[in-house]
Image (cartoon, rainbow, N blue to C red):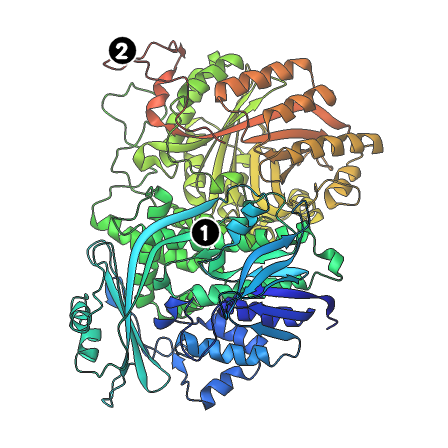
Amino acid sequence: MNKLPGSAIVIGASIGGLSAARVLADHFERVTVIERDVLEDGPRQGAPQSNHIHVLLRRGVDLLEQYFPGLVEEMKVEGIEPFDFTKDLRWLQFGDWMPREPSGIVLYPQTRFSLERYLRRRVRAFANVEILESTAVRALLATPDGRRILGVQTHDRHDAGGAVTNRLANVVVDASGRGSQLSKWLADLGFGPLEESRLPINLCYVSRLFERPATPRDWRGLWVTPLPPEAPRGGAMQEVEGNRWIVSLFGYEGHHPPRDESGFVEFARTLREPDIHEAIKDAKPVSDVQVYRVPDVRWRHYERIEEFPAGLLVLGDSWCYFDPVFGQGMSVAMLEANLLNESLHQLDSLDAVTQAWTATYLRTGAQWLRGLWFFVTAEAMRHAHVPGERTRLVKLAQWYVEELYALNHEHPEVYREFLKLMHVQAGPEFLLRPDIALRLAKRAWKKKSAKGFGHEALQPERPASAPDRSAPQLPHEGTAWPASRVTLGLRYAGRVLANLVVPGKVGPRDRLCHFDTEAMWTPDKTMGWFVRDALQSQRLLKEAGEVRRFLEFWLPFQGLSIAKKALIELSFNADEPGLGFMLYSDNQTVTQAFRQYTHQLGISNEGVERSIAICETFRPSDLGMVRAEFKPGSTTRYSIAASWHFDPLRDHSGFESAMRRLPERFRAGVFAERVKAYANALSTEYFPLFLGLSFQEDGTLESKMYLVRFDERQAPFHPGSELWRFIQDMGVSASELERIKQLNDLLWERSADRMTQVAIETSEAQSQPRRVNLIYSGTETSAVLEAISRFGYPPSAAQAVRGFEQMMQTDRAKFVAVRVGPEGLSPRLKLYKHALFDFADLSVVEDGGLKPRHSQTTGGGTDAAREVPDLCLY
């Protein structure tokens, strides 16, 4: 490797700092590690946590072998014995001891300062690396505008009058730990207050070394985790070098272990299992009791600083530190050093050390930290003293983790795969595996069934007080969720959690829609009135009865129906009257209910049967959608769709396999081949999302193939792109293609997450695509109004958009869709809204007419529907 003709500085000789120095040694001619402590064989003064138990996860061991070849063998020769994480560890997690079968996940337990000693010895062996001891960094050196770091200012700590030195470098890495002064140094350079995420946990550790007795045991390590809120105390012990045990006891808020000798042993006796107490009560201590307090966990958001200086990087506890009970600190620091290595490989010259390069490193690291932070803080919130809102997402994550551990006891093969995730040898795709979701769903189903959950949702029960209508009424509160709906909920939860854990893996390319990460827990109190106003503005008062019958039938099948809530999506035409309603559930429920609903409406033709048959080829727990589009004086258009919403989409072939499962009479023919051809034409740059199917009165089938793409770097519609070629092949002229590009750039730039969704409409009656809809997520209303004025939309559309914005009481639509046909841009413009709909809001929409907006009052005379919703979309 050709080294860059420059230098790098690492602040701190921590595990992360030494790993960073090893990485930088491959890329720079000179690397200097600056450490404020004197480096001896024992714990560093600046790292009091060194006295306590540490675990390097298997991924950390893999990185040791990658960057320090032969080090693991060297450790073994010098007496560090391999340790199988499950066979040699007796681990109490939640309510039971974890299985003890051999896992093949081999660790090398030792004290923290032992591992640092090995790393220092290896790093010092590099001719281009220098480690300066007893030297403190006082400030950063930067250009006058602060946009580029030039080095650091240090002073020698050997004596009170130590020399002050300016040390120049092209890259500076702060790995100085949780006591880092980086935020102060940046403030001295004129950067504003640093944003921090902080969660007080009030944890206290006490640790002691013991001589390891000769008595044989069937374990080499013990780990008794807390079980909050009832049991907030825990402990761990493991073999370390020198034929010793290191024992760490810990407790949260009000349960701090004492530091005296008798109190130490007594605290071990109070743990929820006696194993650690039995092991140490007669063991010989060989060190004093050491105390370490962790008042909080903290994430310093350097990635959010605008114009962050070029060449300044951060890793380890300097950036984000977690609850040490989870044992992630050293491994996270080494993973960030590995990320640093990947970033350095992008440099071909010192000129490439720019603000953009630095920001990319910080942004990528933050995406990875986001998921860890969420899980660690969610687990911390099991303790009653820890502040913070216990949102449904937090409770869901806690439930998921607890159920997953319980599943590990029942399925050894699941446990082996889970351990790979725990040791960062595998990504979070494990959380999305259908077999895992199915097993969790079965556990949930058994628990719900034991509580007498009720009968099947597809048999609606009419409330006694409801008026006699032709459509079924809302089901009873005890209605059961089918297993496919439970599994769908778990898959959805897994998708949300995966977006949090590793958005770089499941997004942004194939994150599926912006509301995946939106907290939408509160029903929009004005939703019913929005429906009423939309019907009125779209001249659909005569269709109000049909709208209500549609909602009455379909709301109970939505996933939140047990709470009398439904996630509902509305589409609103800005250029012509019309209103669409979309509701979501599991695919099995949607297809079965669709057959029942069309039968009740008296619709029976080949198109209905074919659309149901195609959706049935998707898995029962795939996402399903039903859609009704109402237009004044016209026949309502019904359709259903199935989605690969929760599948990993890279190299996705789900559409092909779904089509192969179709009965021969539906699979063969021009229509199926045409739909496949359209999807394949965009398959490299876009990913299949939904397959929507609707039918004409004569039974002719139409489809919409939805594909999606996220790309924050470049608007995906440009000359040479797949989408450009696809629309060009429709016969769109060059001048019109340029207009479409300008419109795309405008809406894409002003969207919430740089998403472009493509809906290709095709019909059996036409050999070419009828049209393509380009859909943008969370686009500002001002951008839509600008598009109307610039690109030939009718002036009435602007008024309609303003009315829509006023009814929604937000300045962003959920989605904005523009239509492109063979002639180019059409005047059609559609806006979408998502919100939670309360079943009680059905009272706003009545057969034959609408109630006045302010006719319903509470007992105190207050309007039942408020003008401002509890939750806006953005």
The structure residue drawn at horizontal position 33% and vertical position 47%, both measured from the top left corner, is 395
Nearer to us in this view, 126 or 32: 32
Vertical placement of 547 versus 292: above or below?
Answer: above
Provide residue 441's location: percent of width, then percent of height: 35, 53
Vertical placement of 53 versus 399: above or below?
Answer: below
Vertical placement of 692 versus 325: above or below?
Answer: above
Q: Secondary structure at mark 1?
A: strand
Nearer to us in this view, 14 or 807: 14
The structure residue drawn at horizontal position 38% and vertical position 23%, both measured from the top left corner, is 525
Residue 861: which disc? Answer: 2
Task: Decide if residue 255 is in sight here.
Answer: yes
Q: Is residue 781 left or right of residue 836?
A: right
Instruction: Report the residue marked by disc 1.
Output: 299
Provide residue 33's location: percent of width, then percent of height: 57, 69
What's under tag 2, amino acid-wise? Gly
For marks 1 and 2, give the CA distance. 47 Å
What's under tag 1, amino acid-wise? Trp
Quadrant of the snapshot with the N terminus: bottom right
